[in-house]
């Protein structure tokens, strides 16, 4: 995972890029990283563009992070979705819960 600061859609945002799979095998470590990052900033941008696989544990982790951000009065935005993440969010019909736009790249639409 990589955390960066700099110019983003939200001026005070911090970006967390997840580069491993959001699966049960990584859930514990990812949970700690997500909650720590969320507590360190008012706005956390979550970049999931490199996530190749996501399972139910990964979806639960994203829901936990969103719920925790709301509880703390912070903002969690998913700013980039991999095809696997988009497909899974669509399958579980939770896109509205997260409230982030799901952008499909033109090359994927073919």
Image (tube, rainbow, N blue to C red):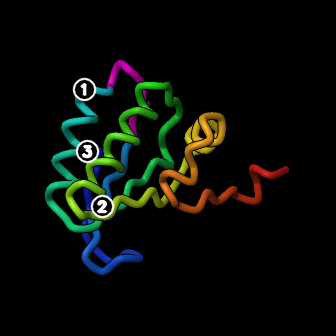
Q: Which residue is mark 2?
A: 44
In x, y percent, where is residue 69? 28, 55
Quadrant hosting residue 106: bottom right
- In the picture as drawn, the residue positioned furthest to the front comes out as 71
- Say if mark 2 contacts mark 3, CB within 8 Å: no
Residue nearest the viewer, comparing 78 with 15: 78
Residue at coordinates 35% horizontally, 77% vertically from top-left?
Answer: 10
As drawn, the label of residue 19 is none
Whether 22 is among the magenta residues is yes
Quadrant occupied by the N terminus: top left
Q: Position of residue 92 (x, y in %)?
A: 60, 35
Quick one: SS at disc 1?
Answer: helix
Dot 1: within a 10 Å radius of its alpha carbon, few (fewer than 14), some, or many (20 or more) residues? few
Q: Residue 2: image x %, image y %? A: 28, 50
Q: What span is colored magenta in the figure?
A: 19-26
Identify the residue at image location x=36%, y=35%. Answer: 61
Q: Which residue is mark 1?
A: 28
């Amino acid at each position: 995972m990589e955390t960066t600061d700099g110019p983003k859609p939200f001026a005070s945002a911090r970006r967390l890029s997840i580069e491993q799979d959001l699966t049960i095998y990584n859930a514990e470590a990812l949970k700690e990283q997500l909650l720590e990052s969320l507590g360190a900033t008012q706005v956390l941008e979550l970049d999931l563009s490199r996530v190749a696989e996501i399972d139910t544990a990964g979806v639960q982790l994203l829901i936990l992070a969103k719920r925790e951000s709301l509880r703390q009065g912070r903002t969690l935005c998913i700013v980039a979705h991999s095809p696997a993440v988009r497909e899974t969010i669509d399958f579980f019909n939770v896109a509205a819960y997260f409230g982030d736009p799901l952008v499909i790249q033109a090359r994927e639409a073919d």
